[in-house]
Amino acid sequence: MSASEAPAGLGFPFPTAVYDDAEALARGAVERLLRAVHESASEKPAVCLSGGSTPKRMYELLAGGDCSGAVPWHRVHWFFGDERLVDPQDKDSNRRMAREAMFGHAPVPAENIHPIRTEGLSADEAADGYAGELERFRSAERQGGAPMFDVLLLGLGSDGHTASLFPGKPGIAVRDRWVVGVPEAGLEPFVPRVSLTLPALHSARLTLFLVSGAGKRPILARIAAGEKLPAAEVSVSGHAPPLWLLDRDAAAGPRAA
Ligand code: 6PG
């Protein structure tokens, strides 16, 4: 794998791998996801997808040519870390992005896709519905305190948010539920959201942050300086610390080995 692990000098508080560019990052993330899925002890490995634009290439790779054959599509179950309260056909829908980049091109059984349903619902109602969806899967497929997700993908917003847990908004403090309604987004698109909470984000065997582009340097520097931002709070999972996958433009670190 063409990535330098935990580059010296980056001063980042979490395990990190730096890739040459966004394409290498997406390929590295696919490799890590596939390894975790194949190593999973579960007959039904669960992957939680991130919204935003960065994971799009990864989703295309999963569904496309050489990688698709390596995905056990009939076994893997796909969840979402957050959703915007827009029509599922809207350009801002995370569900639409995943469908267009991946599910629409893959032999995935419909019952293996677990979107956050928002149609005709308030953010709180949609959150309650998704909490029920997670709970049903968890009680049927995850026993003995096993983590909910085999792989959790997350992104980093320029304000330090992850999923739809924004700095200074109440969702980040919620500990007694796995899913919350987010009436007010802290960043564009300014539509209500539904988001997994920290307890849900801490129930993963492998957590990968995907961060690409020079525009993310300032927020990475703030995390490196120890600011308590939502993304940085996804830190003690009880399973393994999150792994941050950066491209060189984001890390501004040394060239990958
Ligand atoms: C969302 C997200 C969000 C995203 C970051 C990074 O639906 O908005 O899940 O947390 O991952 O904002 O987004 P980009 O990948 O577009 O930079």
Image: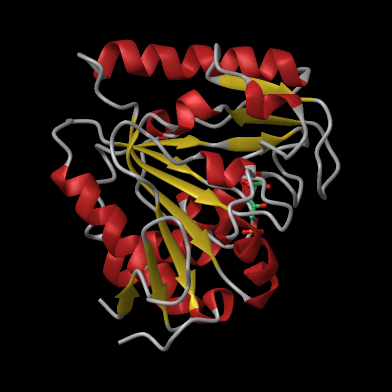
Q: Residue at x 64, y 19 (%)?
A: 127
Picture quarter with the N terminus = bottom left
Q: In this rendering, does residue 118 appear at all?
A: no
Q: In this rendering, does residue 80 appear at all?
A: yes
Residue 119 figure quarter: top right
Above/below status of 33 relative to 47: below
The tally of labels here is: 0
Above/below status of 74 relative to 183: below
Locate residue 102, reporting x and y percent: 47, 55
Residue 196 figure quarter: top right
Locate residue 5, reporting x and y percent: 31, 71
Q: Is residue 76 left or right of residue 176?
A: left
Q: Residue at x 34, y 48 (%)?
A: 107
Picture quarter with the C terminus = bottom left
Q: Is residue 190 left or right of residue 197?
A: right
Locate residue 209, reporting x and y percent: 47, 54
Residue 240 figure quarter: top left
For this rendering, which residue is in front, 250 or 72? 250
Locate residue 73, reporting x and y percent: 29, 45
Q: Residue at x 56, y 27 (%)?
A: 197
Q: Is residue 124 left or right of residue 201?
A: right
Colouring scheme, one of rainbow, by chain, secondary structure, one colour: secondary structure
Q: Is residue 209 left or right of residue 100?
A: left
For this rendering, which residue is in front, 48 or 60? 48
For this rendering, which residue is in front, 63 or 129? 129
Q: Residue at x 64, y 49 (%)?
A: 227
